[in-house]
Amino acid sequence: MPQDLTRDLMDLIERGRDRQLRLAVTGLSRAGKTAFLTSLVDQLRHAGLEARLDLLSASRKGRLLGAQRVAQQDLGVPRFPFDQARASLEQDPPCWPEPTRGISELRLKIRYRPSRQAWLRPETVELTLDLFDYPGEWLLDLPLLEHDYLSWSQTQFDEAGPTRRAMLATWEREATQLAPDADADEARLAEISELYASGLRQAREAGFSNLQPGRFLLPGDLRDAPVLQFFPLPGLANWSQERLAALPESSIYASLARRFRYYQEHVVRPFYREHFRRFDRQIVLVDVLGALTAGPERFEDLSQALARLMQSFNYGQRSLFSRLFTPRIDRLAIAATKADHVTPEQHVRLVGLLEALLAEPLKNLKYANIPVKAMSLASIRATEAREVKHQGRITSALKGTSMDGEPLLTFPGEVPTRIPSADFWERQGFNFIAFRPQPSAPGALPHIRMDAALEWLLGDKLE
Ligand code: GDP
């Protein structure tokens, strides 16, 4: 039997027995995917031993026996670098793991005792958990499938606000000089594409999220490939669709349109077809606190990016997605990460803000009857909550270590529960300080509510 077929068959059998789950983790860059997956694997590897997973029912009841890494099946997908990530946390001083930049995978076998023992039912059972990590930026490309090159080019200008447009100024100067019907010069198109990509990168560095095409920021293995050498063409307003369609293949317009189509067909679609469609469950991580610190324009931009990203999960009837693919994600979690950056009584507010930020997408998901839960968590807790006396009053504060090794005791601010008004930004803002991870100690990594996330994402499979 061909190897692929055997693999699919084995998959099917395991699934039929409900013993396999494909769980995907995503989020925009720096949302905390690498930290989350590192902690998740670490918690499960210490399950049944020192891991603190009380909110995971199988663990609380002592039925979770442990987990082991096993060889993954998709040999074409890079392995999630768990060992490197764990090693950087064990360094002295500890470092945050190097973030992943493309899709990666890791397979665990989890052993547990079923909740009900029955005749002929084995005493212990295994669940195969396939974990995937991929950039949320790739999901920002879904709406691009709805466009042709002309309509895409036109919408790209409407979306960027003044700050972002300024970052693309050098590119815009060059691109506006291009006549759509002139003969394409490959080298020049490559140069102008690079200016476009570098404008997008600059915007990302400056904290913007709603950037497209996604692979320009995280090219994975496509770096320098001509498929990434296109950009929206300014000045198409004076051209009719017919005139543009009649231009020769060698023209600038036709060359860019060809690459755009290639990008749709060979980059965006295959990700959905080969990976996304096969995920059973998904967690979307959001760095709400980082965006709060970055100010109103970035915060609004994050909100737009999330609305776009969440379209991939909105497969109610008539959605763009349902017309293109048949996904099977049957449960979704949305988590505000790095909750250890605020004091414990702020955690509820953080979830409130996350829900406000995602109000529209959450409404759509509920309507499409896809179970979704919003939560806050810290994959790797870097701080400790403390009570301090300040001006005669007891207030809660956070104790941690700055990235330069300075001991810190801070109160970072109140998290608003709604989308902040102009007044919030002027009056208060939010002071997000990066903390160094705590020195390594025996046992599982310290966390906040990783067990709640695990319970929602796989608790029912451990019954
Ligand atoms: P990715 O780009 O989505 O993979 O993001 P990472 O997992 O690399 O996280 C980006 C950065 O956020 C890390 O380098 C840490 O500085 C910070 N971070 C991530 N998770 C946590 C957490 O649970 N607590 C704290 N304090 N910081 C975190």
Image: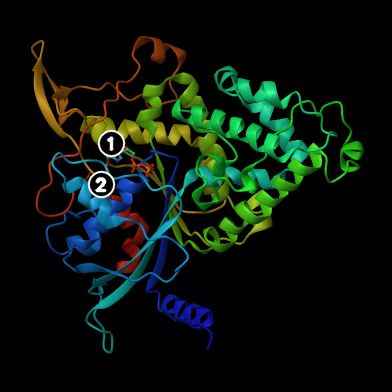
Quarter of the image with the C terminus in it: bottom left
Measured along the vertical axis of the image, is residue 257 above or below residue 344?
below
Ligand 1 quadrant? top left
Residue 11, picture quadrant: bottom left
Residue 17, image x, y percentages: 40, 79
How many badges with numbers are in the image?
2
Task: Answer few, some or many: residues within 10 Å of disc 1's Cα (few below 14, many 20 plus, some between 14 and 19).
Answer: many
Nearest to N terminus: mark 2 or mark 1: 1
Disc 1 C-beta below 8 A from ligand 1 = yes
Q: Amino acid at mark 1?
A: Ala
Q: Identify the residue at horizontal 30%, vertical 21% (top origin).
A: 431
Q: Which mark identifies residue 449?
A: 2
User: Helix or strand or loop: what does disc 2 sit on?
Assistant: loop
Residue that label 1 marks:
339
User: Helix or strand or loop: what does disc 1 sit on?
Assistant: helix
Q: Is residue 404 visible?
A: yes
